[in-house]
């Protein structure tokens, strides 16, 4: 067992992830703001700034959920470009679509239900792919990275925004206390759902650290892989290219 959680097999994990996101979909945005103190907005802004996306380009916002990045990319690529918001979970996709429509973001956004491990797009389709707080939830991360590589155009780039390993031991301790104790309590209070947020803490702890993820990207074929630590390494942005 890890941290009092029983080890789950592959099918159980797929179901567990699905349950978590069905149950958090409605409160997802509120919880993001609360749990990160609004800082997730800065992490996402940094991701957009590092994406190099230009008008007319085609972007895949993978595990796009409620569409924060999609909304920003939609404005950048304009009417000649396209953003595909793909997510495995139809509750999250529905939330994303209605939120973006309410904001008047229509026309250049497409919604696709898809598993990151086996993307339903032709080879060499996208100029950029983002996966923001999504890779952590994917069971076969290597398969997912290979699938992303395949659908990127030559010259295209992948950006992975994800929780990572804090650079300082002291930060790590505070952060563990926060995520394993306070987070499930907040989940219980606000979303009446401690378990989903306990899963969140667990999945953050189990996720590969900065250098491991960089190596995984290189293994999948990405060139020039590098990362930026954000908020002391609590989060990292990885970037790699397909040449
Ligand atoms: N990208 C959004 C953001 O940054 O706010 C949403 C992140 S949310 C924490 C994680 C999303 O990953 C959920 O919407 C979930 O349904 C999706 N997801 C989990 N496993 C997936 C998979 N194998 N393929 C595609 N999406 C997946």
Image: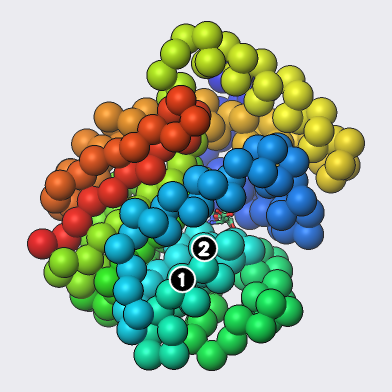
Which residue is located at x 58 percent, y 45 percent? 40
Dividing the picture into quadrants, the one containing residue 229 is top left
Front in this rendered view, residue 6 or 182: 182
Secondary structure beneath label 1: helix
Q: Which quadrant of the figure shows ligand 1?
A: bottom right
Say if disc 1 is inside 8 Å of ligand 1. no
Which residue is located at x 39 percent, y 56 percent? 49
Say if disc 2 is inside 8 Å of ligand 1. yes
Residue 147 position, x and y percent, is 29, 61
Residue 44 position, x and y percent, is 50, 52
Which residue is located at x 15 percent, y 47 percent? 224
Dividing the picture into quadrants, the one containing residue 127 is bottom left
Outermost left residue:
243
Neighbourhood count class around disc 2 (C-alpha, 10 Å): few under 14, some 14–19, many 20 upward: many
Image quadrant holding the N terminus, namely top right
Front in this rendered view, residue 124 or 73: 73
Mark 2 and mark 1 in contact (Cβ < 8 Å)?
Answer: yes
Could you say which disc has been placed on residue 73 in the image? 1
Which residue is located at x 61 percent, y 26 percent? 6
Residue at which label 2 appears: 69
């Amino acid at each position: 067992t890890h941290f009092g959680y029983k080890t789950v097999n592959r099918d159980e994990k797929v179901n567990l992830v699905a349950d978590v996101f069905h149950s958090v979909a409605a409160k997802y945005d509120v919880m993001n703001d609360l749990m990160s103190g609004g800082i997730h907005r800065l992490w996402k802004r940094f991701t957009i700034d590092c994406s190099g996306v230009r008008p007319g380009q085609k972007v895949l916002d993978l595990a796009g959920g409620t569409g924060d990045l999609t909304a920003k990319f939609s404005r950048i690529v304009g009417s000649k470009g396209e953003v595909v918001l793909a997510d495995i979970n139809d509750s999250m996709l529905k939330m994303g679509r209605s939120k973006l429509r309410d904001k008047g973001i229509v026309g250049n956004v497409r919604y696709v239900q898809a598993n990151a491990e086996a993307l339903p797009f032709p080879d060499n389709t996208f100029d950029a792919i983002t996966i923001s707080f999504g890779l952590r939830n994917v069971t076969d991360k290597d398969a997912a990275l290979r699938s992303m590589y395949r659908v990127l155009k030559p010259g295209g780039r992948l950006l992975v925004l994800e929780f990572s390993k804090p650079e300082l031991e002291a930060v790590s301790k505070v952060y563990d206390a926060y995520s394993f104790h306070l987070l499930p309590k907040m989940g219980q209070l606000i979303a009446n759902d401690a378990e989903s947020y306990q899963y969140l803490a667990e999945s953050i702890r189990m996720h590969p650290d900065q250098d491991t993820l960089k190596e995984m990207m290189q293994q999948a074929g990405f060139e020039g892989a590098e990362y930026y630590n954000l908020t002391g390494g609590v989060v990292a942005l990885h970037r790699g290219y397909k040449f």
